[in-house]
Amino acid sequence: MSFQPWELVAGLGIFLYGMMVLEQALRTLGTRAFRHILRDYTNTPVRGVMMGVISTACLQSSSMVGLIVLAFVGAGILTMASALGIIFGASLGTTFTGWIVATIGFKLSLTQYAMPLLAVGTLGTVFISSEHRRHSQARLLLGLGLLLMGLDFMKTNMGTLAEQSIPGVFADYPILLYALGGLLFTALVQSSSATMMIVLSAINAGVMPLTTAAAIMAGANLGTTVTVVLGSLKGSPDKHRVALAHFIFHLLSTLIGLVFLYPILQLISDILTVQDPMYAVVLYHSLFNLFTILLFLPFISPFARWLQNRFADEDGSGCQFITKVPASVSDAASEAIHQEVIRLFYRVILLNLRVLKIRPQELLQEYEGYRVYREISLKNPSYDDQYADIKHTEQQILHYANRVLQEKASSDEAQIVSGLLHAARDMVFSAKSFKDIRLNIVELRMQSDDEEMIETIRHDTRAIYRHLLNLLEKTDLILVAEKREQLDTEINLSHDRLHQMITRYSDGDGIGVPLSTLLNVNREMLVSNQMLATAVRDLVEAR
């Protein structure tokens, strides 16, 4: 039987398509629980590395893990240090595929197992509704069957090639040339697993020596970064940071793999006594990634801080969280909306304080809102620009939330997103109420002969906003209930107090401002404060 190059290429294509189908099925079936684990159990770099190894080994997709990590960093759920740990651990988790194939894939008749999987998988995919969970399970079986079939095609053709090739054909070129070939091939097919399968097939057929295979896998390790780097070119600063970290880590691991290629192979054969070349190349791939992780691990936190200074963050305008998180990652997306609405709350407060000429430092010094204030003050926008930016942000949040809801979010997530949308609308309504009386406030401040009223308004606003900020910070349900009561009481007292001051004047002539203007100011301030109180309650409930 002669060597069939198209059959080899078809085997590679079937294998890659099987990987894609498998990844899509796993994304549907398993990532919700995984994302919760990722969020709750990666609070240190070491845990991040362990989770990166385990999750990539289970999901069989470092790209899926990277997508979720990137989403969580953008949403503020993961710190950069924890994210780096997961990404570094994922590089070791990708070697799990090689271990499975080397242990089982070339020891069994793959067609014998592929056909039942393909039969059940294809029929289930065709006849089961895509809305049903069984459909994803059928696609999972289909993906596994395609993987086995593609691997069998490659194994068979490599065996045929071995019978027709000259021994040592892959041993006459420099190691760096093989590494470059592994890099280019992996960048082209966007899968280091596919490179590993071809290498293992060649080793199993006796076509490729161990040193050549090791060099190819070292180059493939760096080739996996090409897709990530290209995908980050038009991304957010966090995407740039993650891509840079991904590239630096894999560049260093590739250099370690090539520089210490012969010592590592000698360690494997002489000390670990691994003689099977298939096991040896998989172990080599695992070891140089493990060595690099151990090298990076003590420096993850300083490395994360260094990355934070490499790319400038966005300015104080626009959205800074939802732009970094794909709407398809629903729980990360809802957290991104939550963070965006909190930021919108601070921006509304800053705008309202601007109308009353209250210095933001008096209230926000100890809160996250102070950073928002510093960002905005650097731009020094006009009042109208600030208000227009708030309106634009509301629209961005609305469009993004609608995409999240269309991505089949769970009922709990849909309820949270709806509550956050109500909060965003109420905040913008609060800003509008202040905007409507802005000129009245200016008139009161400039024409009034009595400073008591404007100072009372400022005093009451400071007190109400402090209650709002404190309520937003509380997590204990009893304290939240107490703060709600205090806030409602303060808002009503402020309204009554100002109304009593207004009624001292029969027509407002006593302070140089029409009575109708004063009543309008009091009414709009009451509405503004009530809208902010309602919005903060929604934010607290969405936690």
Image (cartoon, rainbow, N blue to C red):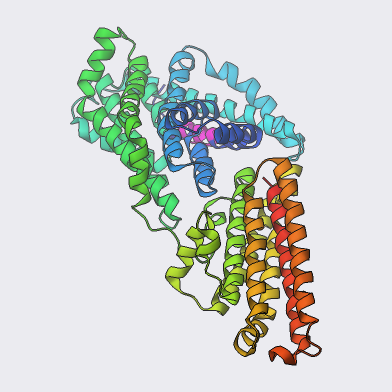
Where residue 432 appears, x then y in whole percent?
68, 74
Where residue 246 appears, x then y in whole percent?
37, 41
Residue 175 relative to residue 302: left or right:
left
User: For the point 45% across and 39% down, which residue is it?
Assistant: 83
Q: Quadrant of the C terminus?
A: top right
Instruction: Verify whether residue 13 appears in magenta.
Output: yes
Instruction: Verify whether residue 96 appears in magenta.
Output: no
Q: How many marks?
A: 0
Viewer can see residue 17: yes
Tell me: residue 375, above or below residue 538.
below
Q: Locate residue 49: give its quadrant.
A: top left
Residue 71 relative to residue 527: left or right:
left
Viewer can see residue 409: no
Who is closer to the viewer here, 52 or 408?
52
Tell me: residue 35, above or below residue 149.
below
Q: Please identify the dominant SS of the magenta region.
A: helix
Residue 78 relative to residue 288: left or right:
right
Q: Locate residue 135: give its quadrant.
A: top right
Image: magenta residue range? 11-19
Where residue 412 appears, x then y in whole percent?
74, 43
Q: Quadrant of the N terminus?
A: top left
User: For the point 21% across and 19% down, which residue is it?
Assistant: 263
Tell me: residue 299, above or below residue 282.
below
Who is closer to the viewer here, 233 or 516?
516
User: For the point 42% across and 54% down, which residue is it?
Assistant: 237
Who is closer to the viewer here, 59 or 394?
394
Who is closer to the viewer here, 304 or 92?
304
User: For the point 56% across and 75% down, which residue is it?
Assistant: 357
Tell me: residue 531, above or below residue 151.
below
Where residue 182 appears, x then y in whole percent?
32, 35
